[in-house]
Amino acid sequence: MKVNFYTSQREYNEKKAEFDKAIFDVIEKGSFILGPNVTKFEEEIKNYTGAKHAIGVASGTDALVIASHILGFTDGKEVITSPFTFLASTSCIAKHNAKPVFVDIDEETFEINTSKLEEKITSNTAGIIPIHLFSQMNNMDKIMEIASKNDLRVLEDAAEAFGMRWKGNGDSYKHSGTIGDFGIFSFFPTKTLGAYGDGGMIVTNNDDLAQKTKMFRVHGASKKYHYDYIGYNSRLDSIQAAVLSVKLKYIDEAIKKRETIANWYMDKLSDCEYVRFPKIKGDQKPVYYVFNILAEKRDELADFLKENEIGYSIYYPIPLHLQKCFSYLGHKKGDFPVSEKISSEILALPIYPEITEEEVDFVCETIKKFYRK
Ligand SMILES: *Cc1c(COP(=O)(O)O)cnc(C)c1O
């Protein structure tokens, strides 16, 4: 049996008529740049997340770069983040010559270790970028407390965290991305809410930051051909917005299915002593964007899965402090031991709403077969 790590085709085939209509409507109307589809989707994101403002941009990466720029993560300022993440969470700091300052992660949840965060704050620190990775949010109470005590700006990298909520399911919950000064989402196709191409969103509850963001995505223009800032050309594409509006209608159902699949994995692998699961901590509602295991002999297991036509992924094989592009920061192996250890053990298994229980069974049986060898 072949099991894809990810496929968009099953969902597309299930809802083909709806997706086709959404896409062709945009083409027929001919409003391609920041037209009604983008505005409609931004309204829907505001309603879903509770954010006061939602501004569609070209990708999650652009969202991080623009938000960092506006928050003044520039010119020698220091910004605290974790090295165990996707490149874009840190390249947005370096892009305008601010300095990434890394803090290691919690061994069980992979979030930034907030007990080690304050010792890295200097008079030059401008902000914190917490990253809500895989299936759970950072401890936002603690981060906001540290930020307010030290007058720091907070940019939540919620690229992977669509649907995740701090304070769980209670009435007073806050959606990921809506707690800091800015939050960003990515609509990269594999993400929980994924487009048929690139896309991203910046959310904020601050009117001034929102106004500036709207200017920054159109070259810094306050009105047509009047440029207040040197900005960007970075808009959420209208066709992608139309696709995303369709997907958002079904997102709660999709999130529930991801949870069911994660439970299948945890159940079916519970008797496998060579595999551990990350923990979810704090009062929050997790969303299984990724389902990870921590595996003994990870690389050999990965090869075995490949031989058996099972897709997998490794997020992330090399922590950012050891990447060539950040060698100028002067870090070496051993500087962030938890990140380095997790990088060598972590393995992501296929999880998408359309995967079948039979496929999950096959993945789990294959893993157990590997350790019986
Ligand atoms: C996907 C991702 C991004 C970047 O999003 P793109 O839309 O691919 O540019 C940033 N940060 C994290 C943690 C991500 O997973």
Image (cartoon, rainbow, N blue to C red):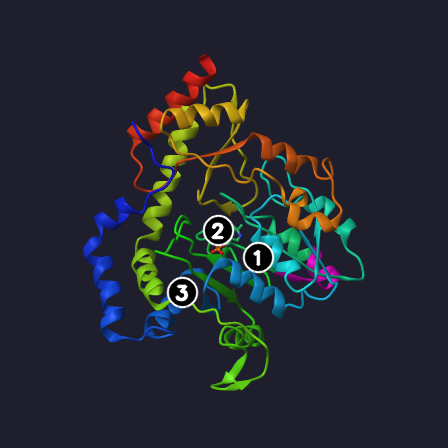
Q: Which residue is mark 1?
A: 156
Instruction: Give the quadrant of the N terminus.
Output: top left
Place of residue 199 in the rendered image (x, y in percent of width and height, measured from the top left): 42, 60
Type of residue at label 3? Asn
Type of residue at label 1? Glu
In this rendering, would 368 be left or right of 196? right
Q: Secondary structure at mark 3?
A: helix
**Residue at 44% across, 69% down:** 235
Mark sitting on residue 47:
3
Place of residue 167 in the rendered image (x, y in percent of width and height, measured from the top left): 52, 51
Q: Is residue 178 visible?
A: no
Point out the frontmost of discs 1 and 3: 1
Residue 312 among magenta residues: no
Q: Which residue is mark 2?
A: 161
State yes or no: discs 2 and 3 in contact (Cβ < 8 Å).
no
In this rendering, would 116 be left or right of 140? right
Please report whichever mark, 2 or 3, sits nearer to the chain's N-terminal start.
3
- Alpha-carbon span between mark 2 and mark 1: 10 Å
Q: Nearer the viewer, residue 267 or 55?
A: 55
The answer as to whether callout 2 falls within 8 Å of ligand 1 is no
